[in-house]
Amino acid sequence: MSTVYGYLYLAEDGAEDGAERDMLLSFPVPEENLFADRDRKGENGRREYRRMVDLLCPGDTVIVMSLESLGGTYGERLTQWELITKEKWADIVVLGQPQLDTRPSAEALDGNSAAILVLEALKREEQKRKDAFRTIQGEGIAAARERGVRFGRPRKPVPDHFRNVKEEWERKEINSRDAAKKLGVSQQTFLRWAHEKETDAGQRPE
């Protein structure tokens, strides 16, 4: 026999939305099957949610007010949606979005269509978030570089005798591989130094 569970994420300031609780109970969700959390973070975050998920069996139904109840980020919501519907083989009903009802008997959409709809929506939102983050990150890196901030491993300092070795190479007395050996660096590093202007009294190239 299938079981109906309800889950609420309560405001962190301690306020409880009684209207949302009443809507879940009137679905109906048996009061003993109603789970609620205030904290999403830390070791004990979403403890009641995890308890509920552990109880789920194939054919059970989880009732939530919104997708936000499943997690704080789009990635978390997607993960939890797939956990409930694909690993636990349970259904989800989102009261705030009637079309998101995976029960086979749902009138708005059949269960499979609702699942496809929400997964595609969440994936799009998650991709938008990632793209926005990359844009902000790229702008931050560009601004830092303009301020002279260097990223990656520190550059190897140019040895004091680099100029002499470079002049030998320019006179074709040695090749670039031999020049690199004399300086104790890779051939690529020597060639990069050789084609850059020296600054800071020969300590490092620009």
Image (tube, rainbow, N blue to C red):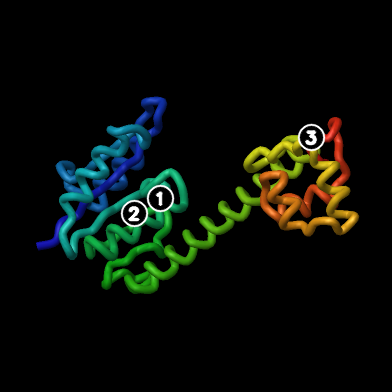
Q: Tell me the quarter of the picture where residue 152 sits.
A: top right
Disc 3 residue crowd, few under 14, some 14–19, many 20+, Cα 10 Å: few
SS for dot 3: loop
Where's residue 180, x and y in %? Answer: 72, 51
Q: Quadrant of the N terminus?
A: bottom left
SS for dot 1: helix
Q: Amino acid at mark 3?
A: Asp
SS for dot 2: helix
Residue at position x 25%, y 62% in the image:
87
Q: Tell me the quarter of the picture where residue 48 sits.
A: top left
User: In the image, 133: left or right of 65?
Assistant: right
Residue at position x 14%, y 61% in the image:
2
Camera-near label (1 vs 3) is 3
Residue wearing tag 3:
160
- From this view, report whether residue 156 is shown above or below residue 88: above
Residue at position x 76%, y 40% in the image:
145
Between the residue at mark 1 and the residue at mark 3, the CA separation in whole angstroms equals 55 Å
Residue wearing tag 2:
80
Q: Earlier in the sequence, mark 3 or mark 2?
A: 2
Whether label 1 touches label 2, CB < 8 Å: yes
Q: Earlier in the sequence, mark 1 or mark 3?
A: 1
- From this view, report whether residue 39 is shown above or below residue 69: above
Q: Nearer the viewer, residue 149 or 141?
A: 149
Residue wearing tag 1:
76
Q: Amino acid at mark 1?
A: Glu
